[in-house]
Image (cartoon, rainbow, N blue to C red):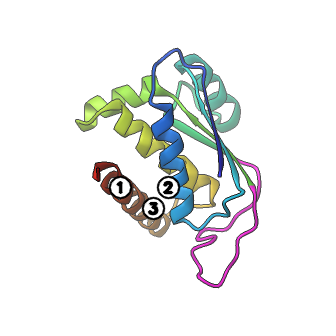
Amino acid sequence: MSIEVANESGVEVDETALVELAGHVLGRMGINPLAELSILVIDAGAMAELHEQWMGEPGPTDVLAFPMDELRPNTGRDEDASPDPALLGDVVLCPQVAEKQAAEAGHSAQDELELLCTHGILHLLGYDHAEPEEHAEMFGLQDELLGAWREVRRKP
């Protein structure tokens, strides 16, 4: 996988962990190893501009996903399928918003960024949560992927 991180936020984040997490998620989802993903970490002002421009909503948000290639949910999870390489797109994270959400949830800002990164990748892969069934599927998968990631990280 080609996974690039650009941190333009002015906030220190564990970029290596985000790359490793993204590789884990894409691998578990069966995405072709030649796929490309970009993770951009930006400040609240820049995120507010993107949020307004692309979603028509004021203020910063926690994560935005900008897909490049059209992929269907469950791409690569079919054992018989051989997913093509793809330019997946961009996941944009805002650590200032993540820090606030982490404090409310009672976990670290890095844990929140990892959750948001996983969430953004699932959006790039075609998952959504507008309908109750979609919400259950996407958040269930998100929890499964993060749980597996955290198990891998705990092993020596």
Q: CA distance from mark 3 to mark 2?
A: 22 Å
Confirm or deny contact between disc 1 and disc 3 (CB under 8 A): no
Q: CA distance from mark 1 to mark 3?
A: 26 Å
Q: Residue furthest left?
A: 106
- The residues colored magenta run 67-86
Helix, strand or loop at mark 3: helix
The location of residue 79, given as percent across then percent down, is 59, 82
Helix, strand or loop at mark 1: helix
If you read the primary sequence from the N terminus, does the residue marked by circle 2 or circle 1 appear first? 2
Relative to residue 76, is residue 11 drawn left or right? left
Q: Residue furthest top?
A: 10
Q: Circle 2 is placed at which residue position?
A: 24
Query: Mark 3: which amino acid?
Result: His
Query: Mark 1: which amino acid?
Result: Val
Q: Circle 3 is placed at which residue position?
A: 135
- Residue at the (70%, 63%) spot, across then down: 71
Q: Tag 2: Cα neighbours inside 10 Å, few (<14), some, or many (≥20)?
A: some
Q: Tag 3: Cα neighbours inside 10 Å, few (<14), some, or many (≥20)?
A: some
Helix, strand or loop at mark 2: helix
- Residue at the (32%, 33%) spot, across then down: 102
Q: Quadrant of residue 17?
A: top left
In this view, the residue in front, 44 or 59, is 44
Please indicate, yes or no, whether residue 128 appears anywhere in the rendered image. no
Relative to residue 1, is residue 63 drawn left or right? left
Q: Circle 1 is placed at which residue position?
A: 152
